[in-house]
Image: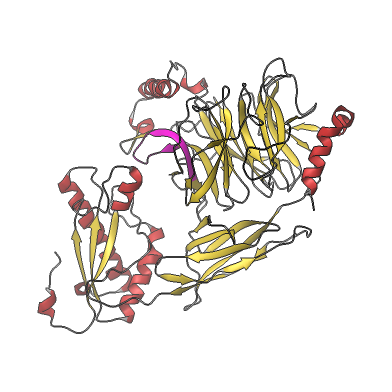
Amino acid sequence: MKNLILQLLFILLVLGQGFSQKFVVEKLGDGLNSEYDEISPVVDIQGKTLYFTRVGYPEYNKTLVEKGEDLSVSMEAGKFESYLQTVYSEIAKRGIYDPENSDYNQDIWIAVTEEDTFDKIIHPSYPLNNALPNSVCSITPSTNELVVINKFNEEGGMSKGFSIVRRQADSTWSFPEPIEIEGFYNLGSEVSMMISNDGSIMVLAMQRGDTFGESDLYVSFKKGERKWSRPKNMGYKVNSSYRESTPFLSDDNRILFFASNRKGKKSGMDLFMIERLDDTWQNWKRPRRFIAPINSEHDDSQPFFNAATGYLYFTSRRDGSSDIFRAKISPPNPPNVLVKGRIFNAKTKKIMNGNVLSGPKKSEYKNMYISDDGHYEVMVPKGVVFTLSPERRGFSSKEETVFFKRSNVYFKPHNVDLYLDPDEIEMVVGAKIELDEIYFAQSKALVLEKSFPALNQLAQMMKENPYLRIRIAGHTDNQGPKPALVKLSKERAESIKAYLVGKHKIAEERIRTIGYGDARPVNDNSTEALRKENRRVEFEILQTAPKEEASLGGKDE
C-alpha cells in the first residue's frame, strides 16, 4: 500500500497553483523568531520539541576552552573578544572583526510546545553551546541524542565534521563525541546533513572533487557505532550545476527534500522534493519545486517534514531576516511508535544502567541508546520488525522483538522491559574484573557519581567472596609530565579504594593500588579517541582463597 503521506505530497505538487490557496504558511512566534537570524529547524519525532540555531545574538555562550582552561573566564573581556576575532578569522579564512555579530556566532536553542505554540524557549549551556559555531543537524532514533555540526576536543579546539551529543538522566548534555565518516572532506565553507528515521542512512550537502556545482547532495550508510561509509554523490538527477543544500529524507527513506538555487528563480533558494526509484540512490523521478506560498521571491531553505503533525518546517527571508515558518502539507500520520521501558538485573530484579541496541531485525547496523538511570526510550518505525537488546559489560542479554502495523494508529507508548543476566566471573588469580567505565572529574582524582553503580557492583562481589583480594591499577594517556601522570593515576586508584572502604566497609588490606601513568598504553595516543581508551582503571584478582598474609604483602605498591 503506497504511503499516504507520499501520495498527498505528490498530489499537492501535481495540482500546482490550483491547490495553492489551501496552503497556510505560518511564521512561528516572536519568542522563537527574533530580529536576528533563526536557522536550521530540527523537530523531534513527536513534533513537540524544535531545535534551532540563532545567529549573531549578543547573549551567546562564550565558553572557549583551550588546554583545559576556559578563556572567557581567565581573560579580560577586551582581550577575550580580540582573541575570538582571531579564532573566527582562522575558521572563516578571512578577517572577522566583530565576533558578536558574525555568522560564526551560532548557538543552539530549544523550543518546546504542549499546545502547538512552541512558547517555552530554552538556551542550553556548555557543552551543547560554546563560543564556536553550534548547530543541530539531525536527531537519531535514540530519543536522547542529537547530531551537531563540527568535532570538539574537551581540552579545546574544533575541526570539520559532526558529533553526537546525549541528554543525560539529569537533563544535562554530554560532551560531543565525533562521528567518523570514511574519506570525509569538504572543500566548501558550508555543510549540512541529516540521519534517516531508522538510523541507517546519512544525507549530506557539501562540496567535493566530484561535485557538479557549488555543493551537491551525497549519501552515506551506517557501518557501526558512530561509523559511516564514504559519501557517494547522488547523481545528476538530484544535483545540478547550481547549489543543492539542506537535505531532509522522509520517514520511509523514499522522498528527499532539499533546497536549490537552480534555474527557475531569479535569485536565492527554493524548496524541492524528489522521489527515489531504487536502492542505488542514483535513479530518481524529476525534482519538483514547491509552489507558492511555501516558496517565495526570497531565500527559502532548510526543509524539515514532521509526519506526526503533517507540518513542513523551513526557513525563509521573506520578512527580511531569516525566520522559521511552517505549513501543513498532509494530515498527521505518525510513522513511529515510542517504545520505552527499564533495564533490569535478571538476578536481583533491580533497575540498572546500560545500553539498548535497536534496529531492523535483518540489518547489521544498530542504533544505541545509552541509559544513565536504567530507563530508555526509542522510536520504532511502523511496518518494520525491530529488535531491542540490552547491553552491559559483565552481563548477557536477551533480545526482544517488536512490530507495529502501518495501518494502525498507536496513541500510547509501548512498554518493553529488558533484562540482563550477570556473567559468572572466573575467580582466577591474575584475571581482570570487567566493570563499566569509571569516570573522574577532569584532570582530578575525584570519582564522579555516575561511576558508583559499577563500584557498587564490585563491592557486592567482594562481599560475596570474602577471600577475594584485588589490585586497582590507574592508567593515563601521554598528555603531560610523566611524574604528574603517575601521581594522578595512583591518586585515582586510591580514590576508588577509599570509596570501597568508606562506603561499603571493605577491609583495606583486601585492596592494593598502583599508578602506572602512561607506561602501559593500549594504543599509540595518536587521537583524542585513542587517548580516551588509555585513560582507564583496571581491576586485577590477586587472591581468591585463604592464604598466608605474608604471601600477599601488607602494603600498597
Is residue 118 visible in the rendered image? The answer is no
Above or below 451: residue 15: above
**Outermost residue to the right:** 18
Range shown magenta: 151-164
Is residue 481 visible in the rendered image? The answer is yes
Give whichever of 195, 370 is nearer the camera.
195
Please give the name of the residue rendered at 89% of the width and 29% of the height, measured from the top-left corner.
18
x, y percentage for residue 341?
A: 59, 65
The secondary structure making up most of the magenta span is strand
Question: Viewed as shown, does residue 551 lie left or right of 34?
Answer: left
* Quadrant showing the C terminus: bottom left
Above or below 392: residue 469: below
Please give the name of the residue rendered at 58% of the width and 40% of the height, measured from the top-left corner.
194
**Outermost residue to the left:** 550
Question: Viewed as shown, does residue 404 lie left or right of 185?
Answer: right
x, y percentage for residue 488?
A: 22, 52
Question: Viewed as shown, does residue 102 lie left or right of 75?
Answer: right
